[in-house]
Amino acid sequence: MFGSNPYAAGGWYNPQNPLSINGGGHPWFPNSNLPPTFGALPTANYSSSRLAFEFAPAQPDILNCTVDGPNRNTYFRVATANGATVIMKPRNEGMARIEWGTEPSVEIRNIIPRANASHWLRLSQDQSHRTMVVNGRNYVWIPRGGAILLLSAGPTPPAELGRITRSSGKVTLELVSDAIQAGLLEASVVATVLFQSGRNMG
């Protein structure tokens, strides 16, 4: 009996039943091609205003660059020498350190104690995404459509918090204001350096 079908009542489209209550196409995303999903990912959109941070120069990598944010202010400097990359705030205050090698390690001041980069950005078994833990919360980095998206993870549906993109001469990290308020700026900057370093994370 079609009237009592719980899937039909919930708005599910049944293409094999021409009498279903939903006529055609996907009821939630009409006239669109659905992207591949991680769990129950929403379409890519931002829930709040976003801020852009540009890593330049980015040729061939971003291991020696400046990170400029809103109003072209320099937020961080990235410098690499003697097998290590140091990320500094203005006035040369150390923020993070990456030590390269067969097992690169990462440390973010007051956020992440020294750990293997591959443990902090843990690759999933199917190699589709990496999980990052910051301030006791889980986040997911997942490649999609030429970008690497930062998503919330947990019991609630994931929300896009940011993305990393590369264009000629620069790498851009975009974060929503909610992500910055949650303390994700420094961790996302370090993750961007790791992802765009051109080096094996282990």
Image (tube, rainbow, N blue to C red):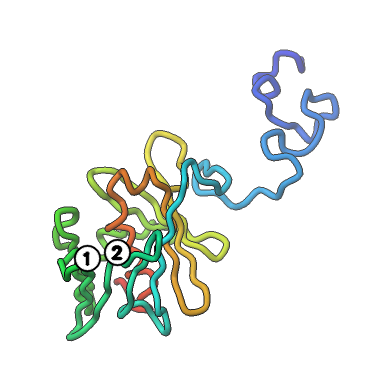
Say the numbered circle drawn on residue 177. none
Residue density around tag 1, few if under 14, some if 14–19, many if 20 or more, within 10 Å: some
Q: What residue did someone put label 2 on?
A: 75
Q: Position of residue 118 (x, y in %)?
A: 28, 64
Q: Position of 159 compared to 88: left or right? A: right
Rendering quarter of residue 182: top left
Q: Position of residue 45 (x, y in %)?
A: 55, 46
5 or 66: nearer the viewer? 66
Quarter of the image that includes the N terminus:
top right
Classify 174 as above or below 197. Answer: above
**Helix, strand or loop at disc 2?**
strand
Question: Mark 1 or 2 closer to N-term?
Answer: 2
- Residue at 27 percent across and 74 percent down: it is 78
42 or 119: nearer the viewer? 42
Q: Amino acid at mark 1?
A: Lys
**Helix, strand or loop at disc 1?**
strand
Callout 1 touching callout 2 (CB < 8 Å): yes
